């Protein structure tokens, strides 16, 4: 049986609140560090049973459409606070702050524009496409996972376990970077939220899909369940050449957590994918 492991964004900024050495994660998901330590422990015990491992890495620079610097409030020019949700007003002419809930978006009259006027047209088009997709509103996140920083690195215990797996199996972890295009969010390890026709890195990772189709089972872990894990799994399922392959996807429920206040998104994802055939297990029981 060919078993693969897919770990989504197991990075310090998502997982470690304070490492005791002056480093603090900027977008920490509650219990994420424990999630990744459980994956590391599973690898230490049963790594020889995995034929291949894939790890996605959220990889940003300082400027991007999901960063506060991209935006300024109309009137006083101030940047939006992290976790501000932005969308197109019902009049179709303005970008405004929204108050999201499980039932939808409630626009306010607090209006925003882009820091550079030249970015406004393309940004407006992006927000419209994102709304049409119907999966996520646009969130302004804290600066996180900047390439080359401590926050971008994989949590230490899992990083060590991955290196051990490479040495012990004479294999190579397939590291998949995502998120460097400044004009689109890229939650999924398969494709960006709104693919850029001029940027192949934002389009469907057909090679990864092909490799996953060749596996017999694919264990999935990572952060966060509500966002990057959810979109990665959905996009894998949608890109499979046959829906029967969905049943080989096994979410490790003790190795993935939701972003706070977005639990309803994780719940909706679980309900959707379980109905399509995705299975669940835990790190302690999987392959034991």
Image: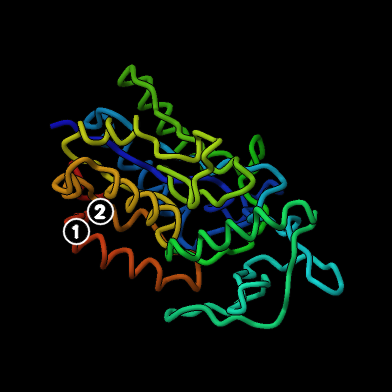
Image check: 73 left or right of 252? right
Locate residue 248: give its quadrant. Answer: top left
Tell me: residue 128, above or below residue 119: below
Q: CA distance from mark 1 to mark 2?
A: 19 Å
Report the residue marked by disc 2.
282
Labels 1 and 2: the sequence-earlier one: 1
Residue 27: x and y in percent read 59, 58
- Looking at the figure, which quarter contains the N terminus? top left
Q: Quadrant of the rendered structure where residue 191 is? A: top left
Horizontal and vertical percent position of residue 230: 37, 57
Mark toward the viewer: 1 or 2: 1
Measured from the top left, where is residue 127 in percent x and y?
58, 61
Q: Residue at x 26, y 44 (%)?
A: 219
Q: Secondary structure at mark 1?
A: helix
Q: Identify the colour scheme used.
A: rainbow
Tell me which residue sits at (68%, 56%) in the image. Answer: 121
Q: Which mark is residue 276?
A: 1
Residue 204's place in the image compared with 51, above or below, is: below
Question: Does residue 68 appear left or right of residue 217 in this picture?
Answer: right
What's the residue at 32%, 57% (across, down)?
Answer: 254
Q: Are marks 1 and 2 in contact (CB under 8 Å)?
A: no
Nearer to the camera, 129 or 86: 129
Residue 159 placed where, x, y %?
47, 35
Q: Quadrant of the C terminus?
A: top left
Which residue is at the front of the view, 180 or 241?
241
Q: Which residue is pictured at 21% across the width and 56% down the height? A: 280
């Amino acid at each position: 049986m060919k078993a693969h492991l897919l770990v989504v964004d197991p990075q310090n900024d998502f997982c470690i609140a304070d490492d005791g050495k002056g480093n603090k994660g900027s977008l920490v998901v509650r219990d994420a560090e424990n999630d990744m330590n459980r994956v590391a422990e599973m690898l230490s015990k049963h790594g020889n049973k995995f034929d291949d491992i894939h790890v996605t890495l959220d990889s940003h620079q300082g400027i991007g459409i999901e960063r506060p610097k991209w935006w300024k409030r109309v009137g006083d020019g101030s940047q939006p606070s992290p976790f501000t949700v932005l969308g197109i007003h019902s009049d179709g002419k303005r970008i405004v702050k929204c108050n999201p809930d499980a039932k939808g978006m409630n626009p306010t009259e607090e209006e925003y524009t882009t820091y550079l006027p030249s970015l406004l047209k393309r940004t407006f088009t992006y927000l419209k496409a994102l709304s049409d997709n119907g999966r996520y509103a646009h969130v302004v996140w804290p600066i996180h996972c900047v390439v080359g920083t401590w926050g971008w690195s994989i949590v230490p215990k899992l990083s060590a376990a991955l290196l051990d797996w490479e040495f012990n199996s004479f294999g190579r972890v397939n590291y998949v970077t995502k998120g460097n295009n400044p004009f689109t969010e890229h939650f999924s390890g398969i494709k960006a939220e709104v693919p850029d026709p001029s940027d192949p890195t934002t389009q469907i990772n057909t090679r990864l899909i092909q490799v996953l189709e060749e596996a017999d089972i694919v264990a999935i872990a990572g952060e966060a369940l509500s966002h990057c894990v959810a979109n990665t799994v959905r996009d894998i399922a949608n890109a499979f050449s046959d829906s029967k392959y969905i049943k080989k996807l096994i979410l490790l429920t003790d190795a993935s957590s939701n972003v706070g206040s977005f639990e309803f998104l994780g719940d909706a994802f679980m309900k959707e994918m379980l109905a399509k055939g995705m299975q669940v297990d835990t790190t302690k029981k999987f392959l034991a």
